[in-house]
Image: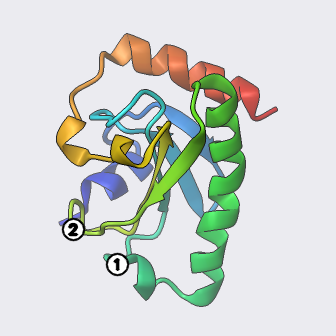
Amino acid sequence: MASIFTRIVQGEIPCHKLAENDQFLAFLDVRPIRAGHALVIPKEEVDYLFDLDDERLGGIMQFAKPVAKAIEKVVPCKRIGVVVIGLEVPHAHVHLVPIQQISDINFALAKPAAPDELETLAASIREAMV
C-alpha cells in the first residue's frame, strides 16, 4: 500500500506545496510543531532516509536548502532545525522546523493547522524562494 506521502506525490491527497522538481517535493506539515514546519521528501517511495542512494541522499538536502532559507525569510526564527526520525511515515523524509531554541523541536507540540492559514503561509514561502 502506498504511503501517505506517495499519495501526496500522486495528487490523491492535497498538500500546501512549497517546492517541487522531478525528484523531490517540499510541503507544509498539516500538524506542525511551529508555523512553517515543512516536510521534504523524495518522490520515490523509499522507507528509510539512509536507504536512499548517495545521490538522492545528498540531493534531498540540496533541495531542502532554498526551502529552509525561504522559511527563515517568512517565519521569525533563529534557525531552521532539521529533524530526521523516520518512524512516523514509511517514506523517507526530513522535517524543517523554524526554531528559537532547541526545546522548540518537540513533536508533542504538534497540532492540526487550519488549511487557509497553511495556504497563506505556503504562498508566502514560495514567493520568498524567488
Label 1: how many Cα within 10 Å (few below 14, some 14–19, many 20+): some
Left or right of 2 in this view: 73: right
Q: Could you tell me which residue is drawn at 67 percent across and 58 percent down? A: 63
Residue 36 rendering spot, x and y as whole percentages? 48, 31
Quadrant (top left/top right/bottom left/bottom right) for the N terminus: bottom left
Left or right of 116 in this view: 81: right
Residue that label 1 marks: 48
Upstream in sequence: badge 2 or badge 1: 1
Colouring chosen for the image of the structure: rainbow
Amino acid type assigned to the residue bearing label 2 in the image: Leu
Residue 40 rendering spot, x and y as whole percentages? 50, 54
Q: Tag 1, which secondary structure? A: loop
Residue 75 rendering spot, x and y as whole percentages? 57, 25
Label 2: how many Cα within 10 Å (few below 14, some 14–19, many 20+): few
Left or right of 58 in this view: 39: left
Q: Nearer the viewer, residue 100 or 7?
A: 100
Residue 91 falls in which quadrant of the image?
A: bottom left
Q: Could you tell me which residue is drawn at 72 percent across and 47 percent down? A: 66
Give above or below for 43 relative to 14: below
Q: Could you tell me which residue is drawn at 53 percent across and 20 percent down? A: 121
The numbered mark at residue 87 is 2
